[in-house]
Amino acid sequence: MEPVKVGLVGLGTVGSGTVNVLTRNAKEISRRAGRGIELVHAAARDIAKRRSCPTDGIALTTDPFEVVNNPQISILVELIGGTDLALEIVQTAIANGKHVVTANKALIAKHGNEIFAAASEKGVMVAFEAAVAGGIPIIKAIREGLAGNQIQWLAGIINGTGNFILSEMRDKGRDFADVLAQAQELGYAEADPTFDVEGVDAAHKLTILASIAFGVPLQFERVYTEGISHITREDVKYAEELGYRIKHLGVARKTDVGIELRVHPTLIPSRRLIANVDGVMNAVLVYGDAVGPTLYYGAGAGSEPTASAVVGDIVDVTRTLTADPENRVPHLAFQPDALSDLPVLPVEEVETAYYLRMRAADRPGVLADVTRILSDQHISIEAIIQKEPALDAKEVSIIMLTHTLRERQMIEALQRIEALASITGSITRIRVEQLGAA
Ligand code: HSE
């Protein structure tokens, strides 16, 4: 059979990795795909630049639309990132009847609904395994491997840069900015690194995971997002004392009344496997009613790990080129006419336990005032630590763990506690997840 011809837009970190993997593993890949896969045309901003991949036999251009409009090409691989030009490229490729493979999480999270509708209309596939958790085949696992389950919740470390920063800060006491700069040098960080540290990148990925897990449309704008820049070494230390680790998690949970979609720093018990996922590694814990908990671990960023997912998609698309479009795996796992309209819950309705840290005057009755307010809001305390004040200091740190409660109760309680004359500044509040069972 004729080799399938592929065009590539974007020859950066992931693009170069894709060329290297396709070249090095060409034989193995064609044994799997049933035919050869030939990269014939690629667009890059600077075609004269020295690259870490071979480009012989590939026609190079600076104009992505030359690739998208090349009639020889059946599969267009989009690896430029961003949502403006990338959207135009993907829409044009679909309109030209080409299948698309993309690593672009922002594009899928924000425009996936319209992209998939256009692709279904044209009978082409849009594959996006590399958009979530780099090299971990998590899309395939949830969409196909767990298709027999009702997924109840999932929780993931889905931003390698953020996890790398938290791990280095904890283990080596390194400075936030210094670790971030290293992540940028290594090609892990987003073009705008605030996307990594403020949770936007994780929110893009969580949007995609929740859709394929629960069969709901992509709803990026409904994700509650909180970053890691306010986490202090003190919190990391107290969390350890209480038997927890702080991880930046994306959590999606299905309840009877709606779906929780949230990205925030989270205390998780140190004994959980996922609490021990360090550095740039990612992990996603998925709880299905039939299978129970399953954990997927691997490199969440980087040139060849992400290329592994891109090439996996190219092989997948190649295998199904001849399959009847009605009988392919649906883009969002569920048939498009069977998507659920279960709402995404406002964060005030979310239920979690909490870690609280506050600075309080060291005098009788202060703790009683705090616990009275918590009790008025029906908030039950699970653990409490009061640190001895430093010599001559007039304030102490009080650290508490609560039982599970609704966020609205916590917001009200915190407002009242912060208004007490004996409490200084704002209270640090980090959600706690046990990640045990359903
Ligand atoms: N900036 C992302 C991360 C790259 O650090 O995980 C992979 O999506």
Image (cartoon, helix red, strand yellow):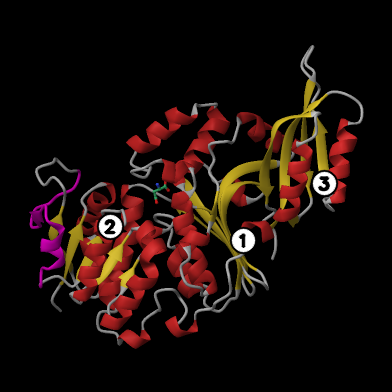
Q: Is residue 391 visible?
A: yes
| Quadrant in the picture for residue 351 | bottom right
Identify which amino acid the numbered label 3 is placed on. Answer: Glu
Q: Position of residue 304 (x, y in %)?
A: 31, 51
Q: Position of residue 372 (x, y in %)?
A: 88, 43
**Mark linked to residue 84:** 2
Q: Is residue 171 left or right of residue 111?
A: right
Q: Residue furthest top?
A: 392
Q: Residue at x 43, y 73 (%)?
A: 332
Name the foreground residue: 94 vs 306. 94
On the image, numbered disc 3 is attached to which residue? 382
Name the foreground residue: 58 vs 266. 266
Q: Is residue 5 left or right of residue 104?
A: left
Which is nearer the N-term, disc 1 or disc 3? Answer: 1
Q: Residues within 10 Å of mark 2 (few under 14, many from 20)?
A: few
On the image, numbered disc 1 is attached to which residue? 346
Question: Magenta span: helix, strand or loop, mainly?
Answer: loop
Q: Position of residue 330 (x, y in %)?
A: 40, 78
- For mark 1, give the secondary structure: loop
Q: Is residue 348 left or right of residue 17?
A: right
Kindly report the distance in space between the C-alpha atoms of the residues bearing marks 1 and 2.
29 Å
Q: Quadrant of the C terminus?
A: bottom right
Asked if 33 appears above or below 224 in the picture, the reply is below
Residue 66 lies within the magenta run? yes
Image marks 1 and 2: residues in contact by CB distance under 8 Å: no
Residue 103 lies within the magenta run? no
Does the beta carbon of the residue at mark 3 sit less than 8 Å from ligand 1?
A: no
- Eye-nearest disc, 1 or 3: 1
